[in-house]
Amino acid sequence: MQSEVMFAGFGGQGILMSGKILAHAALTKGFEVAWIPSYGPEMRGGTAYCTVVISDRPIGSPIIKNPMHLVAMNRPSLEKFAHVVKPEGVILINSSLCSVTSGRSDIDELIVPVSDIAIELGTVKAANIVALGAFVTRSKIIDYELLKEAVKEEFAAKEKLIPLEMEALERGKKAALQ
């Protein structure tokens, strides 16, 4: 089994962190993992994306042209990458910033207002964690409990943020189950 996920958005949305947390969670389960970040020179505000490859056997190449899944945090990312997702994959669309769909009927499209949910929680900075909770719940790429532990470990140095991030995960999970 091998699955590939592309996280895409603009710098400052926590795109690379989302991929890193997913990769960390998969590593704790003993999977082979590759995390490949990419971002423009602008950093905050510029295009950012990363690919995470999770496999139960050695990964031949971490460079993926056609990922199984996509988490699109803004419209330019959806328009740029939705067409390369493999059939039957999951495309999560942040409907807070993207008013269009992928236009595909051969994928599982998950439309969640992740930025709006994060704002309800008190900070738009939690949008990436809302999206991660929703994506993992729908795709079942890893066990949700592993994801929770990886988020706790990621924020261990900022313990006061852990309750907020746990709530963001739960709100994402709830949105994916509706």
Image: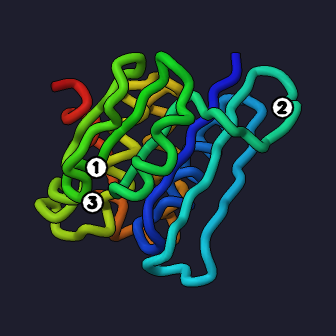
Separation of disc 2 and disc 1 at Cα? 29 Å
Q: CA distance from mark 3 to mark 1?
A: 19 Å
Could you say where residue 2 lies in the image, as x and y percent from the top left?
70, 22
Q: Which mark is residue 14?
A: none
Q: Which is more N-terminal, label 2 or label 3?
A: 2
Query: Looking at the image, is 139 positioned above or below residue 41?
Result: above
Q: CA distance from mark 3 to mark 2?
A: 34 Å
Asked whether, in this view, residue 87 is left or right of residue 127, the answer is: right
| Viewer can see residue 68 | yes
Q: Residue at x 61, y 74 (%)?
A: 40
Quarter where residue 50 is shown: bottom right
Q: Which residue is mark 1?
A: 94
Q: Is residue 167 visible?
A: no
Q: Please tell me which of labels 3 and 1 falls first in the chain.
A: 1
In contact (CB < 8 Å): disc 3 and disc 2: no
- In the picture of the structure, the residue carrying the numbered disc 3 is 164
Amino acid carrying label 3: it is Leu
**Taking 46 as reference, is 40 left or right?**
right
Asked where in the image residue 173 lies, by quadrant, the reply is top left
Total count of labels: 3
Q: Earlier in the sequence, mark 2 or mark 1?
A: 2
* Labelled disc at residue 59: 2
| Residue type at numbered disc 1 | Asn
Q: Secondary structure at mark 2?
A: loop
Q: Nearer the viewer, mark 3 or mark 2?
A: 2
Q: Residue furthest bottom?
A: 42
Crowding at dot 1, Cα within 10 Å, few <14 / some 14-19 / many 20+, comes out as many
Would you call the spot at circle 2 few (<14 residues within 10 Å), some (14-19), or many (20 or more)?
some
Foreground: 105 or 28? Answer: 105
